[in-house]
Image: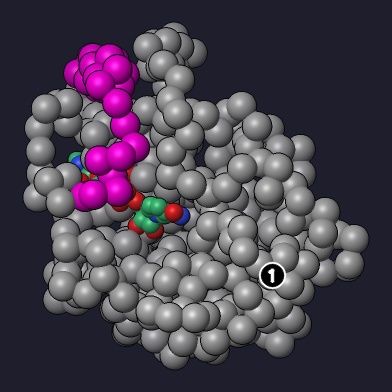
Amino acid sequence: MEYVKLGSTGLDVSRICLGCMTYGVPDRGTHEWTLDEEASRPLIRQALEAGITFFDTANVYSDGTSEEIVGRALADFARRDDIVLATKVHGRMRPGPNGGGLSRKAIMTEIDHSLRRLGTDYVDLYQIHRWDPHTPVEETMEALHDLVKAGKVRYIGASSMYAWQFSKAQYTAERHGWTRFVSMQNHYNLLYREEEREMLPLCADQGVGVLPWSPLARGRLTRDWDTTTERSATDNFGSTLYQEGDRAVVEAVTRIAGDRGVPRAQVALAWLLHQDTVTAPIIGASRPGHIEDAVAAVGLRLSDKEIEELQRPYAPHPIAGH
Ligand SMILES: NC(=O)c1ccc[n+]([C@@H]2O[C@H](COP(=O)([O-])OP(=O)(O)OC[C@H]3O[C@@H](n4cnc5c(N)ncnc54)[C@H](OP(=O)(O)O)[C@@H]3O)[C@@H](O)[C@H]2O)c1
């Protein structure tokens, strides 16, 4: 495994982050395709043994049970100080007023619930899962800064939003002397490259680390276009993200992987790892081979010609995943 600094911080993270949305009680929350605790634990352990030290979850994943499963597994298989643990806040955790969003009340409540579920007294990277148009950004940024000062959170990050929103949050923090976001977790892969227009240049300019989610387009980059899996058949959000024209990109990945004799997942992840702005893709792994491929992708060097071939069939997409 390789380790890099997260953006302009001093924090070391593994070049692969294990996405823990895959791990959670299937009948809790909205992801019926998740693995239960017994099936999840060996994968988390395998990731640790492969040198992955960076783990991403969220309060909303499987109604909090992802945080519980990940917290218990990391306590059993790792030393807390060796791990970079990331979670998120914003999604609705219960019906009714103040059940979600980025108000001071929601943030202060949700961090304590996350810490309890994770079984730790601090989170390394606390990310806002989305922009909250109903809360002044000053309120959100001050509340996040207070969590850092209280020692509950080491660094703060953000996830999918428009570049103008991210920029506004950063200059608001700067103006008040509050903590700035150190990372952007966004939707970026060979099938969705709209982030190259505004968000990625902004992150590069500001020294913000980039953590792409769904780096394999939720599995679409790993198999023939018409194949379905148990997850893809029930992945409602995933079915809104891609379009028929993406088939040509999947075919380019298939060709290059075939020529090299490696699985398609390795080629698609290697492409992301070749992008200067990308710190660590957040992979989803439901089988041991998924982790093996992700680790192998770190060492896979693509030629300029291969990169050009992978990029050429791309057609612009409507903004998706905010
Ligand atoms: N911030 C956000 O809004 C946001 C949104 C989405 C995700 N995330 C984060 O990103 C993480 C990853 O998301 P994701 O699961 O959608 O990522 P992904 O890596 O794009 O997709 C994972 C899926 O791809 C397939 N796959 C993975 N490796 C493979 C391999 N080597 N060979 C064949 N198939 C392979 C599997 O599909 P099958 O199971 O169908 O076989 C697997 O479930 C999440 O866990 C979460 O932490 C964040």
Whether the magenta-drawn stretch holds residue 95 is answered as no
Which quarter of the picture shows residue 189? top left
Asked whether, in this view, residue 21 is left or right of residue 184, the answer is: left
Residue shown at 70% from the left, 77% from the top: 143
Q: Residue 94: horizontal and vertical position, in percent? A: 38, 80
Depicted 303 relative to depicted 20: above or below: above
Three-letter code, disc 1:
Thr
Q: Mark 1 points at which residue?
A: 140
Residue lying furthest front in this view? Answer: 96
In the rendered structure, does residue 248 fall within the stretch colored magenta?
Answer: yes
Segment colored magenta: 235-259
Judging depth in this view, the residue of 78 and 235 nearest the camera is 235
Q: How is the image coloured?
A: one colour
Residue 272 place in picture, x, y as percent: 46, 33
Location of residue 69 in the rendering, given as x and y in whole percent from the top left corner: 29, 78
Magenta: main secondary structure: helix
- On the question of residue 261 being in view, the answer is yes
